Structure formats: C-alpha cells, structure tokens
Amino acid sequence: MARDYTSLHDPNAEYTMRDLSRESMGLSNDRGARDVEITDIQTAMVDGNFPWTLVRVYTDAGVVGTGEAYWGAGVPELIERMTPFVVGENPLDIDRLYEHLVQKMSGEGSIQGVTVTAISGIEIALHDLAGKLLDVPAYQLLGGKYRDSVRVYCDCHTEEEADPEACADEAERVVEDLGYDALKFDLDVPSGFEKDRANRHLRPGEIRHKAEIVEHVTERVRDRADVAFDCHWTFSANSAERLARAIEDFDVWWLEDPVPPENHDVQRQVTHGTTTPITAGENVYRKHGHRRLLEEQAVDIIAPDLPKVGGMRETRKIADMADTYYVPVAMHNVSSPIATMASAQVGAAISNALAVEYHSYELGWWDDLVEETVIEDGYVEIPERPGLGLTLDLDVVEEHLVEGEELFD
C-alpha cells in the first residue's frame, strides 16, 4: 500500500526517531534507514548580523535535516544547482555525497570559495538528518565525545572601538553580566595616527595604541577570562611582527590573522617571530588549505570556519591533522544557532577543541531562531537529542527572512 507522506513534510514541524514511530516514517520491517532517499534541498536566507543561509534536506520518509552555509553571494543558487546530484541518494552516505558534490562542482571551483561553502551547508544538514534517522546525536557520527559542553568565546564590540578604556569596560560587562570567560576584540581599529592604511604599515603611535587596548582589557579581566585580539589580515609582515612583540608581556590568548591569508611563508615568519600565540585559518578551505599552516607550524592555533570550510567531517579532518602537531582548534563562527551547534558538536567530538566563536551577542533575537537553548553562561551544553538537537522556529525564521526570500515549502 502506498504511504502518504504529505503531513510529514509540514515545514512547521520537526521530526526525529523519537517523535515518530518507524511505521509512520516508512521504516517498518521491510524498510530501514538504508532505504531512505533524498527528495529535495531547499534554502532560506535569514537577515541576521550576517545573512545566514539555512539549508534543509528532505527525504521520502518525511525526516528533514537542517544545516547552514556561511553567507556569500550565489550560495543558494549553487545549492539549487547541486540538488539533482543528490536526489535519490541515501542521506547516510555523508562522505561519499560530499566527495560526489566536490567532483560534480569542480567547474565551479569546488576546492575553495562559495562552492565549498554551499557544499558545507548540505553536509551539515546531512549530519542532522543522519542523526535523526539513526537516533543518535551528531557528535556520535563523528566518533563520540570528549566533553559534555563546549566553551564559547564572545566577539565583543563597543561604540568607541578605538577607546582602550571603553573596550575594558565592555570586557568586564560581558564577563560579569553575560557570564563569558572567553572574549575577543578587534585591533584593526582607528588610532588617529594612520597616514596610509593601504600600505599595511603600522606607525609607532598605532602600535602603542593597539598595545594599550590589549593592556587595558587583559588587566581589567585578569584571570576571569581569556582574551583574543583580531587583526582581520590588515598588516604587513614587519608591522605584524612589531605588534606581536609589543604585546608579548600581556596575557593574550591569541593574535588572529595579523597578515593577509594568501602567503603561508609570511604567516610562518610572523608566527615564528614572536611568543604571542598566532591564530589563522578562517580564510582557507578544506583540509588541503590548512595543510601547510599545520605542517610548517605557521600557526599556534588553527581557526577553521565550519559552515565555510567544508562542513562537520572536514573540520574533524582538519582537527585530526592539527592534533598531529599538538595544535588546538578555535572555530571561527559568525553563524545562526544551527551552524553554531554544528561547530559545538564537532568541538565535543575532537580532543583538541579550544572554543567556538559567538558573534551575535548584540542581536536580541539570535536564540529565538530555535526552540532550544544553545549558549548558557558562555558554554554550549551538547544535547543528547538526535542530529544537531535543534528545532527551527519557522515563525521567527519567516519574520527575519532577507527581503525577497521565501520560507521553505
């Protein structure tokens, strides 16, 4: 007798193995998870502090997986182009489908850039979907977990970005009022000494000003929080080395992306020229892009961006490579709760996880996007629910869609 899956594709409902009997999912007796097929992939872009591209993979069993791709022009169109390549496939074959998409999209540049980002969104959704089909949390698909909760570091901002005292005030507020014990501030901020930012050179007054920000913030929070500082690939090699040496006496968690990402030789030079820990990695793709950074010990901490770099298993592979060199992993993250939880699930499953970034503490509705609590007191408690363990609130998604976007069917 033919089964009617219409009600199971209600976009306002989430389904897991615990919510549905095997009969209602079409998995009774003669049909198991190996017989489930992908029927469609859809996207919806949410207007957050970045444009978050949510991705949903549908199946003929009515079970839906949700993922997220890093924001980027053309990502939804790329996902639409990839959909026929996975329709009819079994969603449990995550590695094979990932490599299949990389091969099929080689003409679109699937070794880096937005094509990898689009594949990442599908790959995360497949982990959510496979976890639901097998009735296990996503971390179990990655080998189990090392920890029950994953630390979150809060990317902080002030109205007066260049004021060291304002930065220190905000650091104290975030620690005391919001409960974070890990923070990050920007150092590519105006100092009043700039003459020509295009040449990437830091004048002495600029270095003193940036060192003052570091001093004020680290001295204010002391042992209550670790503090990292981001440079956004702004400085020349010599200027980055001078800056890194100028802050060596302070308790800096890491100095992030002090030089442009293209030249690994310069990255290695800066890292080897200072005792200040240096972090990079968010602007390279897949394990291949991170290989030289790790093999040449060009970073002290590696920072892949999971919904950009290739997804959950690719991040796991990067972490395993990093562990060979005893390098910890601090995942860059500017995502909605979906990819944030995906990063935390990977963080639970790898030995060398340091922290996951949170970039939306000033956005009042970030955590309303899902029904569950994601971050509490600066940590993500890893859920034992199947898949990513999150349920989209589709009313909130619809309320905050990018203009012109439509909600999932």
Image (spheres, helix red, strand yellow):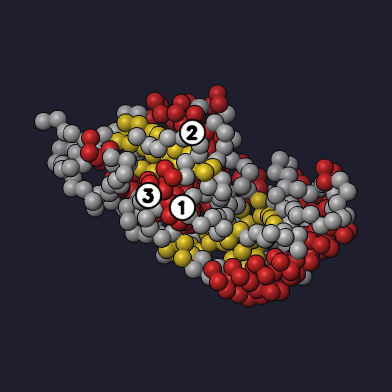
Residue hosting label 3: 393
Looking at the rendering, which quadrant does residue 42 occupy? top left
Q: Using the numbered discs, state the Cα–Cα distance from disc 2 to disc 1 in whole angstroms.
A: 22 Å
Q: Residue at x 30, y 47 (%)?
A: 14
Report the residue marked by disc 1: 337
**Image position of 67 (left or right of 196):** left
Left or right? Give the position of 217 relative to 66.
right
Q: Secondary structure at mark 2?
A: loop
Left or right: 64 with respect to 70? left
Q: Residues within 10 Å of mark 1 (few under 14, many from 20)?
A: many
**Element carrying mark 3:** loop
Residue furthest left as drawn = 1
At x 57%, y 61%, the residue is 153
Which label's residue is closer to the chain start, 2 or 1? Answer: 1
Q: Quadrant of the N terminus?
A: top left
Residue at 60 percent across and 75 percent down: it is: 224
Q: Amino acid at mark 1?
A: Pro
Q: Which tag is nearer the camera, tag 2 or tag 1?
A: 2
Q: Which residue is mark 2?
A: 404
For the residues labelled 2 and 1, say whether their Cβ atoms are less than 8 Å apart: no
Residue 109 percent across, percent down from the top left: 57, 29
Q: Quadrant of the rendered structure where residue 176 is?
A: bottom right
